[in-house]
Image (spheres, helix red, strand yellow):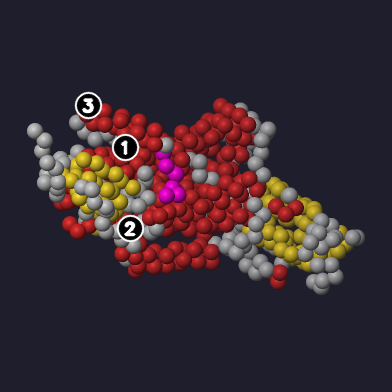
Amino acid sequence: MHVAQNLVTDTLNVQGMTCASCERRLEEALSRVSGVVKAKASYSRSTVQVRYDSDRTTLDQLTDAIEAAGYQVAVPAAPGQRKGQGQGQAGSHRTLSDALGIERVLGVLSILVALYIAFTHLGLPGLANVFPEAEAGMSYGMLFVIGLLTSVHCIAMCGGINLSQCVPLHTEAGAGARGAVLRRSLLYNLGRVISYTVVGAVVGALGSVVSFSGAARGIVQIVAGIFMVIMGLNMLNLFPWLRRLAPRMPRAVATRAAATAAAARAATGKPAVSNAPLYVGLLNGLMPCGPLQAMQLYALSTGDPMKGAFAMFVFSLGTVPLMFSLGVLTSVLNKKFAGKMMAASAALVVVLGVFMFSSGMSLSGIAVALPGRMTPGAGPRGAAVAQVVNGVQVVSTPLAPGSYQPIRVQAGIPVRWTIVAQPGTLNGCNNRIIIPEYGIERRLELGENVIEFVPTQAGTVPFACWMGMIRSSITVMGVGAGS
């Protein structure tokens, strides 16, 4: 006998979705509710559309199922906001100011601006880039130590991502929450180690055959910076439309993973373990940063895939203790404080993404207004002025650990620029200088380092370290201009 159904469709605004896989998790949770015919979640819109029999299921039951899956219903649909059989959808999604509160949006933006100003004026980006560098002939034990020392940089760059992946899901909460945190932190760091090792094998195989120019590294940093900003804003849940730009796992892979999870749940009667932290760790290992790029250059110099892979493996193991400890911290933090900590980390990811974008622009030879780590008074007034000796402009500047002194020269006259590096001034960031305008990339060593070029046009020529974090400029005066 056919039983009549009173089918209605409600669209609920859901908070707490952090990636595209949350769509599947929500749809699975709702599909298990009696009376639900279909559920369609949208990560980019932060909504889930549910079609169900209102005689068998209530909105409260749907809300309970969503919350049991670890999410929150921001705006439960009112009876007047639903549609019945054959009717169009009524109601509309709330605006950003309704969903979050204009005060929160302005507050977070104010924090981002404050962090950016603090980083700029205190020179904090430079602090994260003063790290020991691997050199030819180093033992694997030293590579492990370098990993330990540079893991502070990993915390600055990836701490927010780490925390977001180590918070247990609602289904993992309760007595086993701490075990879930340990497992998620292990998976995240395992992904990083695997990614580092594979990259080491690839660049080791390339050896000295292929090298990336400053412009190529700049493009990588520009792209990475953009995605870091998008990632941070998505973690803050400020602009839901940005989620459409986030990279997604191919649907075929996601469907296969969902089938595997369903089979595991059917066999054990328990929810399948989420491997999302492993995948994020794999991608996180590809994020360009100073110590990682330095180690990749070391692996490149080995000219052997096995040596390159093992060097990166040992280095990555050195970064694990601090990163793992940070993830485990989430097990001793209450939910409210952990949320605030992740919000602060997300804001930091945005600021670091802006700096990475700026660094990439510098490496690509594009002058940008975003300041980096520059010498005080780095304008023309604070520049070292070249003197003409026997038809050649001669200028000498000292190297500082976190800055380059700008210089001022005349157009049309050859320049002989000597950078003097005293003991204790060289580090893994400032030891290679790039001047894109003149196609110069020079490794600096202790003592005098001579760079020669001929400026042809008046203007400002930017230059930077190989990471793009330490920046300065060459002011080229026109012919006949005074000093």
The percent position of residue 50, horizontal first and vertical second, equals: 24, 46
Image quadrant assignment for residue 253: top left
Residue shown at the point (77%, 52%) measured from the top left: 450
Contact check, label 2 and label 3, Cβ < 8 Å:
no
Q: Residue furthest right?
A: 390
Contact check, label 3 and label 1, Cβ < 8 Å:
no
Measure how far apart labels 3 and 1 are at the Cα level: 16 Å
Compared with 74, 121 (above or below) is below
Q: Report the side of 365 relative to 97 (left or right).
A: right
Residue 247 highlighted magenta (yes or no): yes
Measure how far apart labels 2 and 3 are at the Cα level: 38 Å
Measure how far apart labels 2 and 1 are at the Cα level: 24 Å
The percent position of residue 181, horizontal first and vertical second, equals: 30, 42
Of pointers 2 and 3, the one earlier in the residue sequence: 3
User: 427 or 267, which is in the foreground?
Assistant: 267
Residue shown at the point (80%, 54%) measured from the top left: 453
Main secondary structure found in the magenta portion: loop
Span highlighted in magenta in the image: 244-249
Quarter of the figure with the C terminus? bottom right
